Image: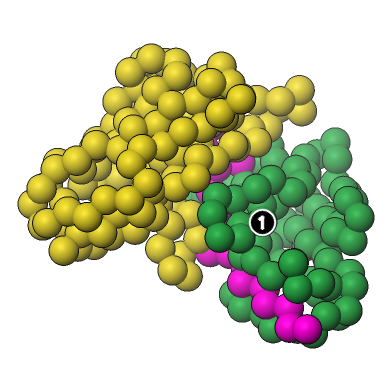
Amino acid sequence: NAGVTQTPKFQVLKTGQSMTLQCAQDMNHNSMYWYRQDPGMGLRLIYYSASEGTTDKGEVPNGYNVSRLNKREFSLRLESAAPSQTSVYFCASSDRNPGGANVLTFGAGSRLTVL
Amino acid sequence: EDKVVQSPLSLVVHEGDTVTLNCSYEVTNFRSLLWYKQEKKAPTFLFMLTSSGIEKKSGRLSSILDKKELFSILNITATQTGDSAIYLCASQGGSEKLVFGKGTKLTVNP
């Protein structure tokens, strides 16, 4: 059972280049998320998708786009990378449990460096 | 805007000490508060606290939720070096969105 799979694990870009982070989950979850983590900043929500076909902005959406390709896959795209986007990116998925809350399962993370 | 504040941001203790980590939250239509532990890689789930479950315990770890004062604490007794990690608190309101705090970095020295 793979859970949440992110690719690539590491990537180095030059300023202005574009790239897409891929995420897939095999738990049949409805909700999927992209977070970024910077030292001392915890996890900050970039975008989330509550269900297939819907996406919503989180706390730090500027400079990113997302696509919920189907129920399994949620991709994050950087159209023109900037050094401020150097970070570790985590994808996560969840469903509401019987108590009405979402417990996120995280991928292993993708370390992105923008030079 | 939903907000989660954790304190302290950093804590250094000796093995065997007891620690208390704090998390305050402001969220519309509160649904849950979650605690995660993050070592080298991805965060792993510890506890979920809701209106119907305000106290949880697992081994040396325990957590309570105070819905009136809008905070939660995570207690770790008899700390071990393996408890060294970043502890993250997150809160969820009426949507599917979860907002995290900045985390508390715990270092347990032998």
Which chain is indicated by disc 1?
A: B
The residue under the point 54% across, 54% down is B41
Q: Is residue A71 visible?
A: yes
Most foreground residue, A76 or B81: B81
Q: Residue at x 47, y 70 (%)?
A: A40
Residue B52 spot, x, y in % from top left: 85, 36
Q: Residue at x 74, y 67 (%)?
A: B82
- Residue at the farthest left position: A16
Q: Which kind of residue does numbered mark 1 sit on?
A: Lys
Q: Which residue is mark 1?
A: B37
Task: Say whether residue A41 is magenta.
Answer: no
Viewer-side residue, A76 vs B80: B80
The residue carrying pointer 1 sits among few (fewer than 14), some (14 to 19) or many (20 or more) residues within 10 Å by Cα, namely: many
Residue B33 visible? The answer is no
User: SS at mark 1?
Assistant: strand
Q: Is residue A111 above or below residue B84?
A: above
In screen coordinates, is A84 left or right of B109? left
Chain A pictured colour: yellow
Q: Is residue A95 left or right of residue A111?
A: right
Left/right of residue A67 with respect to residue A79 in the rendered view: right
Colour of chain B, in one word, is green
Residue span colored magenta: B92-110
Asked if residue A107 is positioned above or below residue B81 in the image, the reply reads above
Give how far across and how far down residue A30 sits, in percent.
53, 20
